[in-house]
Image: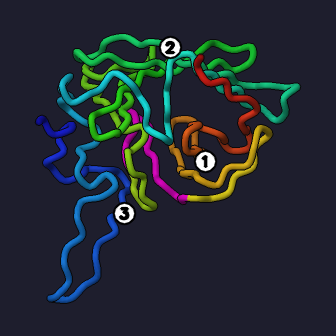
Amino acid sequence: MRIPPRAALAAVAAGAVLVLAGCGSAAEPSPPAGVDTLVIPTPDPHPSDFVAAVDNPWLPLRPGARWTYGDSAAAPQIVADVVAGPTILGIRTTTLVRTVEGGTPTRDHFAQDRAGNVWWFGREGEWTAGVGGAEAGLAMPAHPRVGDGFRAGPETVVTVEDLGQETEVPLATYDDTVTVEVRDGGGLRTEVYAKGVGLVRTNETGLVAYDEPR
């Protein structure tokens, strides 16, 4: 069986904090966890390392799903839809289309490896993995761990800040969550992902409605 993208090498992750086992001659080393076994970004993703569906519990991207974000149900600001994506480097991707009210849609392409990690393969009109030296970054690990840091895109670095933080948004309150800090060209923001739902909060903008695919 092929190992997920470059999984045999140690992680190269911007800002990563690796939590190790206790010291002492009798201490056993901790097994690889979090992003320890990944090279991020991945320079040579192989199609056989990837699966058709993106079903990571923190970032489920099922075609037909829709998320609506805003301060209230009466004033939605952002709508996100999942559609089939293009094939990039021989890998079939899934596209998340985000539309800010009155703005131009942003189309991001993702694919999931066999271990459950979700990789970001590009943003339409800005960059694509395999073009001009761009490489696929990590969008969401299969098993997030506090302190893990990783590069998601050419100018985007993500750090896992918390697990299980209770988060209240207009739609509901979630406590099975992953909180991350995202630093990119637009500055710094906090995002919260709820298990089985996906992104539920970006800074002060929360989830208003979630429509699962039928």
Question: Label 2, label 3: how many angstroms apart (C-alpha)?
Answer: 35 Å
The stretch of residues the image draws in magenta is 150-163
Q: Secondary structure at mark 3?
A: loop
- Residue 41's spot in the image, x, y percent? 28, 38
Above-or-below relation of 96 to 2? above
Closer to viewer: mark 2 or mark 3: 2
Name the kind of residue labelled 1 in the image: Thr
Question: Which mark is first along the chain, 2 or 1?
Answer: 2
Q: Residue at x 44, y 12 (%)?
A: 84
2 drawn magenta: no
- Residue 10's spot in the image, x, y percent? 19, 53
Question: Label 1, label 3: how many angstroms apart (C-alpha)?
Answer: 18 Å
Q: Secondary structure at mark 1?
A: strand
Residue 25, quarter of picture: bottom left
Quadrant location of the C terminus in the rendered image:
top right
Question: Label 1, label 2: how many angstroms apart (C-alpha)?
Answer: 25 Å
Name the outermost residue toward the front.
Answer: 214
Query: Is the Cβ of the residue at disc 2 closer than 8 Å to that at disc 3?
Result: no
Which residue in the protein does label 1 denote? 190
Question: Which mark is first along the chain, 3 or 1?
Answer: 3
Closer to viewer: mark 1 or mark 2: 2
Quadrant location of the N terminus in the rendered image:
top left
Which residue in the protein does label 3 denote? 17
Can residue 14 be seen here? The reply is yes
**Total numbered labels placed on residues in the image:** 3
Question: Which mark is first along the chain, 3 or 2?
Answer: 3
Q: Residue at x 73, y 49 (%)?
A: 173
Q: Secondary structure at mark 2?
A: strand
Above-or-below relation of 172 to 44? below
Name the kind of residue labelled 3 in the image: Val
Which residue in the protein does label 2 denote? 83
- Residue 138's spot in the image, x, y percent? 36, 38
